Image (cartoon, helix red, strand yellow):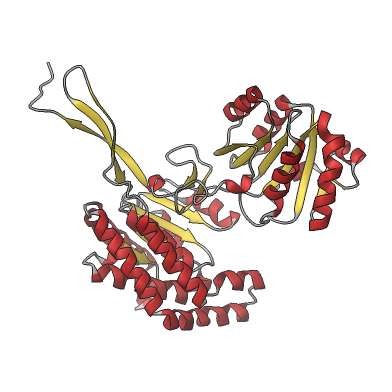
């Protein structure tokens, strides 16, 4: 079966698209309770098939070791009793979230007597392209299912056995509650051309969401004929203002950088107002030295603390590592200018006690998340009360910031009348 698919990838992917479109029409009409029942049933199936999942995952781990995957990649790939249990818990948590589909908002009477509002509806069919982590198969499927969308999942070749095993559990759960198995389909070929074909299925797929490294996201953005929800980089800033509280400045900066290094909402460039640099930078150096964080500073920073020199490329770099670039600025105007020039429009934070500066920063910094006296690490769907996220978008159209259930829906106008005629 796989051999036939590999011989004609375009036909195979088109069949997936056609089936997904048919399933999306069914799913859009499904009540919340049935979707929740499906999610709980899938969670039960994952637990029931735990040993099979680990056995299939072992095939991927063995192949990964032979291919020379590094320890971090193998760790992300591994499925254990604990990770499978967390996967099941995640499904149950999504089942407990409010269903946005069908919600009517902004309903108001017009002078003609009609009522006009907006109803939240599914996007339709979502294609998701991702790497490494088998748990994404379950998480993405669950978010799409709860938001009423059919989905086509294309995971990395390094996780093909794991992803297919998880997909089998998902489809068994769907079937048990009477939903089409085609609501969630995993691409079962490792042929790289499958990605290209998926990006061309504009008649069957409504949106593409890539999750992975920069090269993957750039390829998807450049090649897709379908709208894409994505972010490329997480070059996040903290600006310590003239009117910052010292303790907040140090603790928020440290947490933004050191709570986790390899995430898109981790601090990469620190901006410090000139009037506070002599006081604050030595204290920050002390805490970052203990953590083993390499500091790279502008000329003014190097005159205050012992650190490596920052080059122009540092302001454009997402390190995803214990490295922090530091620039001293004259004040708020220069900080905003630097952020809007170098930021990836992901997350930026100001530390200040000045309300007027707070309002200016929030209004003028052009990023998906703008924070005041808070760590950039809060830029996360769970922390925002979304319960779960499919990713974080730095795009400006449709969805921006953490994309949860609401971000996987759209709006249509609904009009209520009682025989009303336009005169």
Q: The C terminus lies in which quarter of the figure?
A: top left
Q: Position of residue 168 (x, y in %)?
A: 35, 74
Q: The N terminus lies in which quarter of the figure?
A: bottom left
Q: Nearer the viewer, residue 327 or 279?
A: 279
Q: Nearer the viewer, residue 147 or 128?
A: 147
Q: Position of residue 74 (x, y in %)?
A: 60, 73
Q: In which image quadrant can residue 172 be found?
A: bottom left
Q: Residue 59, can we see it?
A: yes
Q: Nearer the viewer, residue 60 or 146?
A: 146
Q: Residue at x 42, y 68 (%)?
A: 88
Left or right of residue 145, residue 328 in this image: right
Q: Position of residue 217 (x, y in %)?
A: 54, 53
Left or right of residue 232, residue 205 in this image: left
Q: Is residue 200 above or below residue 68?
A: above
Q: Is residue 321 above or below residue 89?
A: above
Q: Residue at x 66, y 56 (%)?
A: 260
> How many numbered marks have been drawn onto this rendered protein structure?
0
């Amino acid at each position: 079966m796989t051999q036939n698919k590999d011989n004609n990838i375009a036909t195979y992917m088109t069949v997936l698209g056609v089936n997904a479109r048919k399933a999306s029409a069914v799913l859009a009409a499904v009540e919340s309770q049935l979707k929740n029942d499906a999610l709980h049933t899938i969670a039960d199936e994952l637990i029931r098939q735990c040993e099979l999942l680990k056995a299939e995952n072992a095939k991927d781990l063995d192949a990964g070791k032979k291919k020379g995957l590094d320890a971090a990649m193998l760790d992300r790939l591994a499925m254990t009793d604990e990770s499978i249990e967390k996967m099941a818990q995640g499904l149950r948590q999504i089942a407990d979230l409010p269903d946005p589909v069908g919600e009517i908002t902004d309903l108001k009477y017009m002078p003609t007597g009609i009522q006009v509002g907006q109803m939240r509806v599914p996007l339709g069919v979502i294609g998701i392209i991702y790497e490494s982590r088998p748990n994404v198969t379950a998480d993405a499927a669950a978010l799409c299912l709860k938001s009423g969308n059919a989905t086509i999942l294309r995971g990395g070749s390094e996780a093909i056995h794991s992803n297919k095993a998880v997909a089998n559990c998902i489809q068994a759960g769907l079937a048990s509650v009477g939903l089409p198995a085609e609501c969630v389909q995993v691409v079962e070929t490792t042929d790289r051309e499958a990605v290209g074909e998926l990006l061309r299925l504009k008649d069957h797929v409504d949106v593409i969401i890539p999750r992975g490294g920069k090269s993957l996201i750039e390829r998807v953005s450049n090649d897709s004929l379908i709208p894409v929800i994505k972010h490329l980089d997480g070059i996040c800033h903290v600006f310590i203002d003239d009117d910052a509280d010292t303790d907040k400045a140090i603790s928020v900066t440290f947490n933004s950088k050191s709570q986790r290094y390899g995430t898109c909402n981790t601090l990469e460039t620190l901006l410090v107002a000139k009037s506070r640099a002599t006081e604050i930078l030595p204290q920050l150096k002390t805490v970052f030295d203990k953590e083993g964080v390499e500091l790279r500073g502008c000329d003014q920073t190097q005159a205050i603390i012992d650190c490596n020199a920052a080059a122009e490329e540092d302001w454009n770099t997402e390190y995803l590592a214990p490295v922090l670039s530091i620039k001293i600025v004259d004040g708020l105007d220069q900080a905003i200018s630097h952020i809007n020039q170098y930021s990836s429009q992901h997350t930026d934070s100001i530390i200040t006690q000045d309300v007027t500066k707070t309002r200016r920063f929030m209004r003028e910094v052009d990023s998906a998340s703008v924070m005041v006296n808070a760590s950039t690490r809060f830029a996360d769907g769970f922390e925002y009360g979304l319960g779960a996220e499919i990713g974080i978008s730095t795009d400006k159209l449709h969805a921006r910031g953490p994309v949860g259930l609401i971000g996987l829906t759209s709006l249509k106008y609904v009009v209520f009348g009682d025989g009303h005629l336009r005169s």
